Amino acid sequence: MKANTALIGAGLWGRNIARNLADLGALKGIYDHSHEQAAHIAASCTDAYHVQPLTLDGLLADPDITGVAIAAPAPSHHDLAIRALAAGKHIYVEKPLALSLVEAEAIANAAKQAGKHVMLGHLLRYHGAFIALDAAITEGRIGQLTHIRANRLAPGRVRATESALYDLCPHDLAMMCRLMRGVEPVQVSCQTICHITAGIDDIVHADFGFANGVTASIQANWMNPVKVHNLTVIGDEASLVFDDTKPWESKLMRYPMRIIRDSIAPDLERGEPESIPLPASEPLKDEMRAFLTMIETNTPPPSDITEALYVQRMLDRMERAAITTAQQLSRFDGK
């Protein structure tokens, strides 16, 4: 099956998806609630790719469109995904899949009934640095994995309907899912803080504990004055740091170390850090290639519905843990 796609949502991120799908020769049309916006983005592709602005009904009814990329606001993901699947389209959905576990499970059920695949926009799963990091762990280059730490902090765009938990954490949860091979934590604790809008958290801190002894922590914050986007994995022989703010040649670093236990007190012997070479790539273009491959081969992508539901369950558990933490703090404060 040839991959002919359409895009729903031509906002700030949607236009990047449009550009990459058009560059790959697979974008037929764009729908946005603002026809003018859809026409504007389509026109930027038209000369080379003949992309057209479409109505939503027309897009879904077009038998030549085999895949739909949904980059509309998160509150609309559930309804748009259900409609696209019912119309017989494979779908790509920007993170988060949905704003509740119930909605996410409904999308998964709709995909199963339609016999179609769902791909999530977990962009960093397609980043060359993360792929190399994952491979290095598999090759034993850090020894035994002991801890995962992710930081996603930035002076970001504040959202009115989508919290920092749902906006920022899915990327790191998706990477955690991959590194833990889909095993879920036995313990989750979380604290969220709302400074700007009541009920919309701006700061998130979560800790996870796994049955095999591995621990993980995630910090997310769109109020931070500087951008901090990194993933650290610590083993008993070395650590790896994927820092997406660094130049390409130093995005992935390995820090050797050895635990010395034969002295009076345990110590760490550290070696010279080394850069892990990465092939040149564009993560979003690679992600869109995976979307097209999913359509053409009818096979699940790396960020498939199984991973999407893992991430959604973690978001749900973090949200519930944050409520428990807030209640405990309220009792402590005597409120």
Image (cartoon, grey):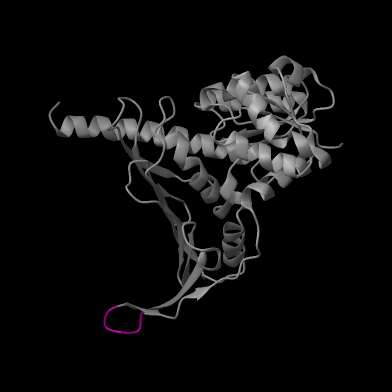
Q: Horizontally, is 111 left or right of 167 in the view?
A: right
**What residue lies at 76% left-to-right and 17% top-to-bottom?**
58
Q: In this view, does 323 lie above or below 248?
A: above
- Numbered circles on residues, count: 0
Outermost residue, right direction? 1
**What residue lies at 78% left-to-right and 24% top-to-bottom?**
88
Q: Can residue 300 be seen in this view?
A: no
Q: Horizontally, is 227 left or right of 47 in the view?
A: left
Main secondary structure along the magenta-highlighted residues: loop
Outermost residue, front direction? 47
The residue closer to the viewer here, 146 or 284, is: 284
Name the image quarter holding residue 46: top right
Give yes or no for residue 263 being in the magenta stretch: yes
- What percent of the width, then of the height, locates residue 177? 55, 48
Q: Is residue 189 above or below residue 110?
A: below
Region in magenta: 261-265
Q: Quadrant of the N terminus?
A: top right
Outermost residue, top direction? 57
The residue closer to the viewer here, 238 or 44, is: 44
Name the image quarter holding residue 304: top right
Give yes or no for residue 31 being in the magenta stretch: no
- What percent of the width, then of the height, locates residue 208? 41, 48
Q: Horizontally, is 53 left or right of 4 in the view?
A: left
Q: Is residue 128 visible?
A: yes
- What percent of the width, then of the height, locates residue 39? 67, 25
**What residue lies at 74% left-to-right and 23% top-to-bottom?**
113
Outermost residue, left direction? 334
Q: In which quarter of the image is the C terminus?
A: top left
